[in-house]
Image (cartoon, helix red, strand yellow):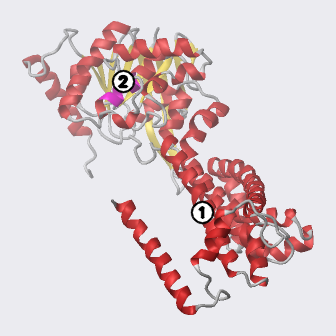
Amino acid sequence: MTRRLGLVLPILLIIGWEIAAIIVNNPFYLPKLETVIPVLLSPFSDILGTGSLVDNALVSIERVVLGFALAAAVAIPLGIGMGRFAVLNDFFDVTLELFRPVPPLAWVPLALAWFKIGIVSIVFIIFIGAIFPILLNTVDGVRGVKNTWIEVGTTLGAGERQILTKVILPGAAPTIWTGLRVGFGISWMCVVAAEILPGPTSGLGYLIMYAYNLGQINVIIAGIIVIGLIGLAIDQGFKAVEKRWFGWRGLER
Amino acid sequence: MTLVLSEVSRTFSSEKAETIEALSPISLSVNNEEFICILGPSGCGKTTLLRIIAGLEYASSGSISVDGAPITRPSPKMAMIFQEYSLFPWRTVEENVALGLELRGLKKPDRVAAAEKYLDLVGLKGFEERYPHELSGGMRQRVAVARALAIEPSILLMDEPFGALDAQTRNRMQHELLHIWEKTKKTILFVTHSVDEAVFLADRIVVLTHRPGRIKEIVTIPATRPRERTSEDFGQIRRHLLDMIREESDPAQ
């Protein structure tokens, strides 16, 4: 019932949009539904010579996965170290806190200066965007592992390595997963934003900016819908894993 | 198996760099298959003493040995049962019980067989696939007992294991613990602040003084079992113990 209730507003918005589009009657401001839907319904056909929706989406996803995977590969081990050893935390904490408030997009000029226009710059921006939520959640997750669990492992004969693999990692996993989920969301925002900036010649961000230059508002709206749907689908995937594997969180007894 | 504590003491240093004596030198010899209760007012260091024996904390001076071999870190001859929150919520009951064997590298079929055997002993046959949060407090402590027994230690260290349970469950767990003790022939060191619990369970009760904890008296309980909680003899012992505990209680509390 609540789900159905949630669908009412989108339907009203679509109806309102169509009415407004008819009244405005200018496709350069507000295109009609019937000009957007065909774009969405033929995701494999070329748009404005930039490749299809699917092609561009795959390019964006590839960039996100690369930057996100790099961020996770750095943030998770570092976060475990910082969560477990106060010395490491004290060493890194101040520096990280200095960099954390800088918006990922503020790095764009520097990224272009260092890595030139291309995939490396975009992956770098995504990396910056994703690393902090993953890192902070990993640190939190490791600190949240109950001391009794570690002592149980110790008294049952676990060495430092087993404590890590059998106690700390599974104990911190739900919180680390939350960090990955948040990090992926930010990555997705970063990739679209980075693709809108000058330089790239592919990706969903590039597609909607290019469509703007050609006055194809219907393509912009179709692109935004696709960007939203992909983000939603990935987030639902993260949530499903959370429910399946980490349902125990909050039920510690 | 004999467990010998000789002149075990522990001091902490406070933030003002004062040294606080938690345990005055304690010497005690525990016989094979004996059930010892360590009884004392809160803050007497009884848990600290147990944790030193378990190898989770160090002694500032003195030594602990099992059959002449000194103990300085967690030993496979001992298993610890904590007050609560000690089960891993991400593992099933069976996986929790098998934890110690898994850490020792036993193959899965052997682990499963051992887990089933000890779950049967604690009366939890059929609960193998459940998760800790699906169990009652008493059942969770049974799992903790099974997990400790599964590594086949000769000594069980129990730190107020029934302290968080309601009175009825607690009484039942005491009965069952005696039953398990008779069946498995373990030596048990059981920390409690409940005079009633100590009188019901122990062969000998070691009464500690208020901080710094030292042995005030060792009370031997007549060997008859099962004990009638309301009988005249035990009433006298209980009164004697209660008087001692009252003298030792911190007047500030």
Q: Is residue A99 visible?
A: no
Badge 2 crowding class, 10 Å Cα cut-off, few under 14, some 14 to 19, many 20 or more, is: some
Query: As rendered, which of B21 and A239 lies closer to the eye?
Result: A239
Residue A214, picture quadrant: bottom right
Against B64, is A213 above or below? Answer: below
Q: Position of residue A93 (x, y in %)?
A: 68, 62
Against B83, is B231 above or below? Answer: above
Question: Is A219 colored magenta in this rendering?
Answer: no
- A178 displayed left or right of B184: right
Q: Examine the residues drawn in magenta and state their main secondary structure.
A: helix
State the residue position of label 1. Answer: A229
| Mark 1 to mark 2 CA distance (whole Å) | 42 Å
Q: Is residue B1 visible?
A: yes
Query: As rendered, which of A155 and A56 lies closer to the eye?
Result: A56
Q: To which chain does the residue with label 2 belong?
A: B
Q: Residue at x 49, y 85 (%)?
A: A19
Query: As rendered, which of A60 and B168 lies closer to the eye?
Result: A60
**Disc 2 residue type (three-letter):** Phe
Against B75, is B15 above or below? Answer: below
Q: Position of residue B138 (x, y in %)?
A: 29, 30
Q: Residue at x 32, y 41 (%)?
A: B42
Q: Residue at x 23, y 26 (%)?
A: B197
State the residue position of label 2. Answer: B127
Same chain for marks 1 and 2? no
**Disc 1 residue type (three-letter):** Leu
Q: Position of residue B143 (x, y in %)?
A: 38, 25
Q: Magenta residues?
A: B139-145
Q: To which chain does the residue with label 1 belong?
A: A
Determine whether the residue tagged by mark 2 lies in a helix, strand or loop: loop
Q: Are marks 1 and 2 in contact (CB under 8 Å)?
A: no
